[in-house]
Image: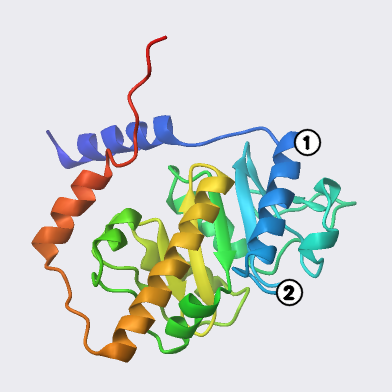
Amino acid sequence: MKRTAVRRRVARVLTKRAVSLSPTPNLRSEIVAVGQRMSTSGLSPGKSGNLSVRVDGGMLITPTGIAYSEMKGADIVEVRSDGRVAAGQRVASSEWRIHLAIYKARPDVGAIVHTHSLNATALACLHRGIPAFHYMVAEFGGDRVVCAPYATYGSEDLARFSVKALGPRTACLLANHGAIALGDTVRQAYDRAAAVEALAAQYARARSLGRPRILSAREMARVVEKFKTYGKQAPVEE
């Protein structure tokens, strides 16, 4: 098969997998609920962090400068795929460029959560990712969680670095900043953000005790494959 034909076939597959939703009131309420949970759990202290969901022609994203405890569904901002925002809406999160860049690069992604969680951010401030010190790192689709280089928040550079650090995976760290997690839904993205923080805490603790033993690339490839069916239940017949 010629290379051009292969590319077209891959493009068709990705298009079929693309997540696209309409911006319903329930979806806005769900974003607010997950944002409030993100705040109260400590994954994003204060007004830090942001989250979004892909919708037809763009995304819904949390606004800038509004505490999660005070946020309402009407505050969620709809941003078009070209970055435009209709008049009468709140100002979108300063990190809207990261979210749009990821959605454009990854048609399989339905939601994004960006946190400033304690341990993940601490590692990011050391410009350290999370290596394969534990097999659960494979949950994110690879043998490590990469730390993207530093760039000013809200910048095109940071958006570009984020996409590159993620690659095909579902999480990355941002140097001197925080973490990003992806999912089919905003709740799945939140769960992955929590999992990143847990692994970051375990890795930091392991480093404080000694030198963690890193699993081999071969073993991690085996675990990544096993994770494709991990936690999936067969339908129960009534």
Residue at mark 1 to residue at mark 2: CA–CA distance: 25 Å
* Residue that appears at 57% across and 64% down: 114
Above or below 169: residue 14: above
- Residue closer to the observer: 151 or 206: 206
Q: Which mark is residue 46?
A: 2
Q: Looking at the image, can residue 237 be seen?
A: yes
The scheme the figure's colours follow is rainbow
Q: Which residue carries the number 1 mark?
A: 25
Q: Amino acid at mark 1?
A: Pro
- Residue 44 point in image, percent of width and height: 63, 70
Above or below 85: residue 228: above
Query: What is the secondary structure assignment of the residue under circle 2?
Result: loop
* Residue that appears at 58% across and 47% down: 186
- Residue 82 point in image, percent of width and height: 64, 52
Q: Amino acid at mark 2?
A: Gly
Within 10 angstroms of label 1, few (less than 14), some, or many (20 or more) residues? few
Q: Which mark is residue 99?
A: none
Within 10 angstroms of label 2, few (less than 14), some, or many (20 or more) residues? some
- Residue 187 point in image, percent of width and height: 56, 47
The residue furthest top is 238
Classify residue 141 by image quadrant. Answer: bottom left
Query: What is the secondary structure assignment of the residue under circle 1?
Result: helix
Which quarter of the rendered picture does the N terminus lie within? top left
* Residue that appears at 55% across and 71% down: 156
Classify residue 42 by image quadrant. Answer: bottom right
- Residue 87 point in image, percent of width and height: 87, 51
- Residue closer to the observer: 55 or 73: 73
- Residue closer to the observer: 164 or 137: 137
Circles 1, 2 touching at the beta carbon (< 8 Å): no
The residue furthest right is 88
73 relative position to 207: left or right: right
Q: Earlier in the sequence, mark 1 or mark 2?
A: 1
